[in-house]
Image (spheres, grey):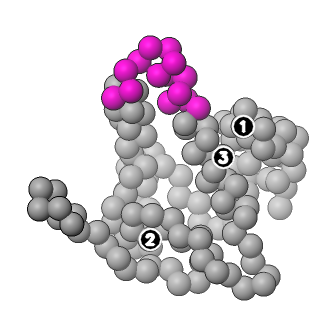
Amino acid sequence: GSKWVQELTTGLEDRNRTAPFPFCGNRFEFRAVGSSQNCAFPMAMVNTAFADGMAKLSEAIEAGTPVRDAVANMYKEHERVIFCGNGYSAEWPIEAAKRGLPNLKNAVEAAGQFSTEKSKAVFERMGVFTPEEGDARAEV
């Protein structure tokens, strides 16, 4: 490393060895999964969210907002989702509630999010799902 950059410490712990798509401290990992599992769908969802965010950032920059300000504004708008603690601990649901974040505990709860107006708008804007396809995904 560089002697001019302060050393960064990050948790390298592997909190969930069974998930094909875990968040490991500072990154998502796509792991080799068994033949009955596929991480393509979670990848598509993350890529959709990322593409939508980058489209919004691009719109701000193209509208004349300086890049630094556009990024800073986006960070301020979304910083509540950054959590550096243990997402599997008892403290996370309490912290999520304080931040006004959902804490979906199972696949049925999560699937219901496909039919929210916000989700359907993102999927349609990004050309991933029509609103009807979003509704169909929510029907578990």
- Whether residue 90 is visible: no
Q: Quick check: is 97 in the magenta stretch? A: no
Residue at image coords 84%, 39%: 130
The one of 75 and 2 positioned closer to us in this rendering: 2
Identify which amino acid the numbered label 2 is placed on.
Cys
Mark 1 or mark 3, earlier in chain:
3
Split into 4 quadrants, where in the image is the C terminus?
A: bottom right
- How many numbered discs, if any? 3
Which quarter of the picture shows residue 43?
bottom right
Label 3, secondary structure: give it: helix
Residue at image coords 64%, 80%: 32
The residue labelled by disc 3 is 48
Which quarter of the picture shows residue 55?
top right
Residue 24: image tag: 2
* Range of residues picked out in magenta: 55-68
Mark 2 or mark 3, earlier in chain:
2
Identify which amino acid the numbered label 3 is placed on.
Thr
Q: CA distance from mark 1 to mark 3?
A: 7 Å
- 124 shown above or below 48: above
Q: CA distance from mark 2 to mark 3?
A: 20 Å
- Whether residue 80 is visible: yes
- 12 shown above or below 75: below
- 107 shown above or below 99: below
The residue labelled by disc 1 is 126
Identify which amino acid the numbered label 1 is placed on.
Met
Residue 103: image tag: none
